[in-house]
Amino acid sequence: TLVILLIFIVGAFILLVFSSQLSDILKGKTDIETCRLSVLAHAKAKTLPIVRVDTPRSAISLDCPRRILKIFEDKVEVNDKKSAEYDFNKLTAEDVNRIVAEELKTCWYMMVEGNRNVFEQSIFFSEGKYYTCLICAEIEFNKNIKPTTFEGLNDYLKSRKIPEQDLSYFDYLVRSQREIFAYLPYGQYYNPFGYGTRNKIAEEKINTNEKYLIYFLAMKPAWLVEKTRAYTSAYYIGLGKENKLTEECDILVN
């Protein structure tokens, strides 16, 4: 009877741990799908062009809270809970590059791979073009990790295929830009035919004493400018420190 009782207690504990991890995974995936659906709804419900770029008029708001990642020597916490998606015993460059690649992919997926016209536009030529950003994830390292630089992200993105897909991370992140810009003049400000659209995803070195942001960037020309095809709305995935967003983003929506 004692043996059976011990087996029952151990089994119940294992089920409790597993169900907790499963619940966290499902919640994370639900948040991702909720964001993607809100992006689709926002793009469909957008109103007419606006006079000011800082007064969004869509009836649908984006439901895309930031994912907060903290990397430890032997685990990753997402929103203060241990992630079952990132499993390793001792942190290596391979692990760091996989984490960053997966978060870039997740951000791009949430924002519908840049295939929907999100965020409002000014109507006047005088407004020119401006850059709107949404932060998908914040990544930082635990203070106890010895200061280290991890390299090889570019090669990882180009050489590794997305799980269960015959497509590399890099090709997934830039595919839509190549299609969007096929008919535009070569001299457009963003040139997607080289690596990583103005080096948006070309952070080659990841330092453990720095905080990194993964963000979605939209280049939005004035509505009339876009109608003439001098410029077109274009969308990119970004990775960098906070000062990079300060330099590149005119508007931050979250």
Image (cartoon, helix red, strand yellow):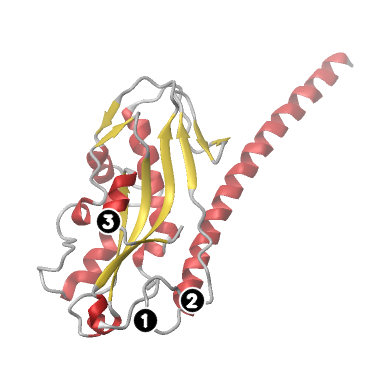
Residue placed under numbered mark 2 in the picture:
58
Counting residues from the N terminus, which is met first, the one under dot 1 or under dot 3? 1
Task: Give the amino acid type for the residue marked by disc 2 in the picture.
Answer: Ser
Q: Are marks 1 and 3 in contact (CB under 8 Å)?
A: no
* x then y, percent, for residue 93: 32, 29
Identify the amino acid type marked 1: Val
Tell me the distance, in whole angstroms, between the alpha carbons under discs 2 and 3. Answer: 24 Å
Q: Is residue 168 visible?
A: no
Assess disc 2: are there few (<14), some (14-19) or many (≥20) residues with their C-alpha within 10 Å of its C-alpha. some
Figure check: 234 above or below 140: below
Q: Residues within 10 Å of mark 3 (few under 14, many from 20)?
A: some
- Residue bearing the label numbered 3: 248
Answer whether residue 65 is visible to the viewer in this image. yes
Residue 132 screen position, x and y as percent: 35, 63
Q: Secondary structure at mark 1?
A: loop
Residue 13, label in figure: none
Q: Nearer the viewer, residue 53 or 29?
A: 53
| Earlier sequence position, callout 1 versus callout 2 | 1
First in sequence: mark 2 vs mark 3: 2
| Residue pictured at 70% horizontal, 28% vertical | 14
Mark whose residue sits in front, 1 or 2: 1
Residue type pointed to by label 3: Glu
**Which residue is at 48% across, 31% downward?**
87
